[in-house]
Image (tube, rainbow, N blue to C red):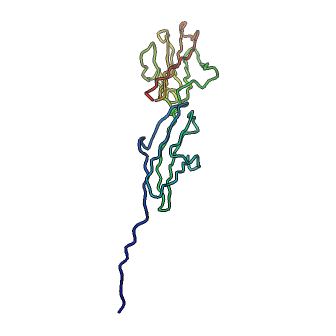
Amino acid sequence: IGLWHLVQVPPLPGFHCWIQAPPTSLRARIGQTVVLPCVVQGEPTPEHSWFHNGRPVGNERSLRIPAIRHSDNGTYTCVASNSAGEDHADIALHVLGACSCMLPGCRASMQASTRTAVLPCDVEGSPPPSLTWLKDSQPLVSSSLLMYVQGGRMLRLGAVRTEDAGTYTCRAKNPAGTAHSHYTLSILGKVVREVKFNVSSGLVLGSS
């Protein structure tokens, strides 16, 4: 008669990994320094590895990214491993860039005739800024005589009239800041006589 013995084998030491403080999605402005922590528990003590969009970038417990650039945008993965296995946690880092004029020296050109005037607003930012046009500090509403072109990147005035003279402002805004382009439009009869352009920008920053 055979004897059967029940042998209990303790499970291998396990561990888990998590990002303790920040959420899985972070935003940072260009030039800032960001520290991504990876708090891990396990027995034996797990090893850390960091990856940026799948490429290894370090093996520290916390990953420090100084002077954030656009190229730092993407997914960061902390991988923790020991003899019991491995686990990972992801953080999506979104790099914010302030709105700024794209044209050389922030000088804009304008196309005008006796019937129409086109005011450009060529800006860049990350994420892409929302654009709003104002005339004499009052918001403009698109109409048959006043059209937003390319999502507001150009303002087209049809059948220019004397009362269209004034100061036109393109306001570009994203979470990293705000930039303004100002046009002073002068009308002589139905002819566009003079257009002056200048740019001023001011960052609207949240608390870090």
Residue at 53% x, 42% y: name it.
63
Closest to the observer: 193 or 73? 73
Position above or below: 97 against 85? above
Position above or below: 208 against 164? below
**Count of picture labels:** 0
Q: Position of residue 89 (x, y in %)?
A: 46, 50
Q: Position of residue 29 (x, y in %)?
A: 51, 31
Q: Residue furthest right?
A: 104
Closest to the observer: 181 or 153? 181
Q: Residue furthest top?
A: 188
Q: Position of residue 78 (x, y in %)?
A: 50, 49
Closest to the observer: 204 or 100? 204
Asked where in the image residue 116 lies, by quadrant, the reply is: top right
Asked where in the image residue 108 lies, by quadrant, the reply is: top right
User: Where the C terminus falls, by quadrant?
Assistant: top left
Residue at 55% x, 38% y: name it.
65
Q: Position of residue 66 (x, y in %)?
A: 56, 35
Residue at 54% x, 50% y: name it.
49
Q: Residue furthest bottom?
A: 1
Position above or below: 191 against 96? above
Position above or below: 108 against 14? above
User: Where the N terminus falls, by quadrant?
Assistant: bottom left
